[in-house]
């Protein structure tokens, strides 16, 4: 067959009415993203105000735990600003050079945010160890408790604002996790202030600082791990490529499947490519293609797929040599 092969040979998706639901999904996702951006802006303002209050309060009261929580709030503020910028970049439409669009900017921002949070946690831990040698440093528990309570209230509001948007962006998911960590950190500071006020034991401040670090590190690692999987184009968590292969090979007129790849550009939407070798004497029409894409989309939640349906004789062509000796 001379010239460009028909669409059914190349495995291109043909426009069909039953696929029209994907457009509604796109509009819904766009609306959710816009809603997430507006809520993110509100959280950035609150987090920045609380950071300034905790920083001043920590310096005035002498509480390392309050300064530790301020450091975490700073990392959140910077990370949230980065998330907002990345979300704005991600709204740009795909171009001829960036055919996937710019949603991966959010993943890069999430990775940088995770590294920054981990660095701050290590600094706090070093300071906490040093404070053990100077446990008698004066601490104003009233200031410490009041500022921590303000931070707690702010974190509760921020968590409620972001909770419904975490399914649409890795950045927002990371921001939500950090807000929860801040919330627990504020609780630790309040408890430390109460213990010091009633017992005079200043070691509670150091213990609260260490607790905050133990809260921060796992979440920073989790976010960095998720971002790293996306940047390395690894198979996302929860995706079973062996199950995908079994489901496709169970279809009529399918001999086997090879070159199956599943990845995500933004940590949310799945993409896949696969070569399907047909047992039919002549390559089937759109029926097999639709069945494969139905399995990928409806069963395994792949948002965009590229399927190549092949003759068994095409196997040699994969290495550059056709069955008939053509290259």
Image (cartoon, grey):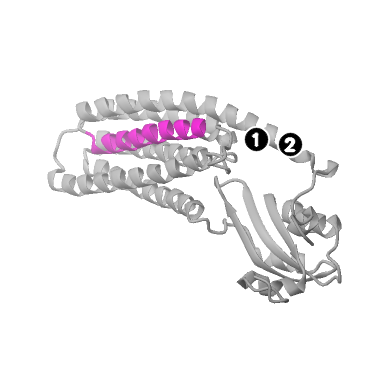
Horizontally, residue 139 falls left or right of residue 232, namely left
Q: Secondary structure at mark 1?
A: helix
User: Disc 2 or disc 1, which is closer to the eye?
Assistant: 2
Q: Position of residue 242 (x, y in %)?
A: 66, 68
User: Which mark is on residue 45?
Assistant: none
Q: Position of residue 25 (x, y in %)?
A: 71, 37
Horizontally, residue 250 falls left or right of residue 228, namely right
Question: Relative to the observer, which residue lies in front, 285 or 67?
Answer: 285
Q: Quadrant of the N terminus?
A: bottom right
**Magenta residues: mostly which secondary structure?**
helix
Q: Which residues are magenta?
A: 63-89
Q: Quadrant of the C terminus?
A: bottom right
Q: Is residue 198 visible?
A: no
- Residue pointed to by mark 1: 29
Asked if the stretch drawn in magenta spans residue 80, the answer is yes
Q: Tell whether label 1 touches label 2 (CB within 8 Å).
A: no
Relative to 41, say whether 127 is above or below: below
Q: Is residue 326 visible?
A: yes
Q: Residues within 10 Å of mark 1 (few under 14, many from 20)?
A: some
- Residue pointed to by mark 2: 23
Q: Position of residue 34 (x, y in %)?
A: 59, 27
Q: Residue at x 74, y 35 (%)?
A: 24
What is the total number of numbered labels drawn onto the structure image?
A: 2
Measure the alpha-carbon separation of dots 2 and 1.
10 Å
Q: Residue at x 42, y 23 (%)?
A: 45
The mark nearer the N terminus, 2 or 1, is 2
Q: Secondary structure at mark 2?
A: helix
Horizontally, residue 13 falls left or right of residue 157, namely right
Q: Residue at x 67, y 71 (%)?
A: 317
Q: Position of residue 236 (x, y in %)?
A: 57, 56
């Amino acid at each position: 067959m001379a010239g460009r092969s028909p669409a059914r040979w190349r495995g291109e998706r043909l426009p069909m009415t039953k696929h029209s639901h994907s457009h509604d999904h796109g509009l819904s996702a766009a609306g959710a993203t816009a809603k997430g951006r507006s809520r993110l802006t509100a959280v950035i303002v609150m987090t920045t105000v609380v950071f300034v209050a905790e920083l001043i309060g920590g310096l005035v009261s002498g509480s390392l735990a309050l300064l530790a929580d301020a450091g975490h709030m700073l990392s959140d503020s910077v990370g949230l600003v980065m998330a907002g910028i990345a979300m704005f970049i991600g709204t740009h439409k795909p171009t001829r050079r960036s055919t996937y669009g710019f949603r991966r900017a959010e993943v890069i921002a999430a990775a940088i945010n995770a590294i920054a949070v981990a660095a701050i946690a290590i600094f706090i831990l070093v300071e906490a160890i040093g404070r053990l040698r100077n446990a008698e440093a004066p601490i104003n528990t009233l200031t410490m408790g009041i500022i921590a309570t303000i931070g707690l209230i702010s974190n509760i509001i921020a968590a409620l604002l972001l909770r419904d948007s975490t399914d649409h962006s890795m950045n927002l998911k990371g921001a939500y996790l950090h807000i929860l960590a801040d919330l627990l950190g504020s609780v630790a500071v309040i408890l430390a202030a109460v213990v010091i006020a009633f017992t005079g034991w200043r070691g509670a401040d150091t213990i609260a600082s260490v607790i905050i670090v133990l809260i921060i590190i796992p979440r920073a690692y989790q976010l960095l791990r998720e971002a790293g999987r996306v940047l390395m184009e690894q198979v996302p968590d929860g995706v079973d490529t062996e199950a995908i292969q079994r489901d496709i090979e169970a279809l009529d007129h399918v001999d086997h499947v090879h070159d199956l790849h599943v990845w995500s550009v933004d940590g949310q939407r799945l993409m896949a490519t696969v070569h399907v070798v047909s047992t039919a004497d002549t390559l089937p029409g759109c029926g097999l293609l639709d069945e494969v894409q139905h399995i990928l989309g409806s069963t395994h939640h792949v948002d965009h797929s590229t399927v190549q349906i092949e003759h068994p004789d095409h196997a040699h062509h994969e290495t550059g040599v056709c069955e008939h000796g053509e290259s």
